Image (tube, grey):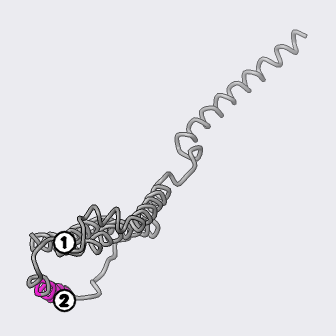
Amino acid sequence: MLMVLLLVSLAFAAQALRARRLLYSALWLAGASAVLATAFYQLGAPMVAVIELSVGAGLVTVLFVFAINVAGEENLAGPSVVPAWIGGTVVLVAMVLIGALALPMPGPGAAAGEGTFAETLWQARGLDVLVQIVLIFAGVLGLLGLLAEAAAPLDQPAAHEIAAERQRQLQVLERTAADVKPREEVHV
């Protein structure tokens, strides 16, 4: 089970590197972090799993999406800074080292002194989790503010069309009023 989780996390991380858009990369990275948090829990480190899940998959993803929306998403034209064969070699060496460290470890399950995932999340680390939830919520609200309409509602094209139509109606009324006014003067 642990090897499956590590392979899925590795696949998500590879997709984060291969994605053409930064936003998709941030979402793949969040998925890799969530699967990695599950692997940490399987290795008997529930507190590390909680922190990885809330910070790695939650807060960091919100910050990445925020930064991408603020800075904009530009396509970089030109060659890569690092040649592909060097990057591939570094990734392969890292995979071998991580695999060598992960394989001899004891089987799944929490440590003897540790509780279940839910107990660790809501009791032992309850205040930390609540603070992180507030930070993530604030980040999401900030993103919604950024993604909201850039112009005020009255500055939208539909509002301009309605204002132009009312201006035309007002001009027609002024012309008819001007035409009616001389006739009234004649009768007076």
Percent coordinates x, y for residue 168 in the rendering: 64, 32
Q: Residue 94 in magenta?
A: yes
Q: Where 183 sits versus 159, above or below?
A: above
Q: Where 92 sits versus 44, above or below?
A: below
User: Which secondary structure dominates the residues rendered in magenta?
Assistant: helix
**Quarter of image, res 37:** bottom left
Percent coordinates x, y for residue 28 in the rendering: 25, 67
Residue type indicated by callout 1: Ala
Q: Which residues are magenta?
A: 84-100
Query: Local crowd at mark 2 within 10 Å, few (<14), some, or many (≥20)?
Result: few
Per the image, label 1 sits on a secondary structure element best described as loop
The answer to whether residue 54 is left or right of residue 99 is right
Q: Which residue is mark 2?
A: 90
Q: Which residue is mark 1?
A: 110
Residue type indicated by callout 2: Val
Percent coordinates x, y for residue 103 in the rendering: 9, 82
Which residue sits at x=36%, y=68%? Answer: 125
Q: How far, Cα to Cα, is label 2 from label 1?
A: 32 Å
Which one is earlier in the sequence, the residue at label 2 or at label 1? 2
Per the image, label 2 sits on a secondary structure element best described as helix
Which residue sits at x=57%, y=40%? Answer: 159
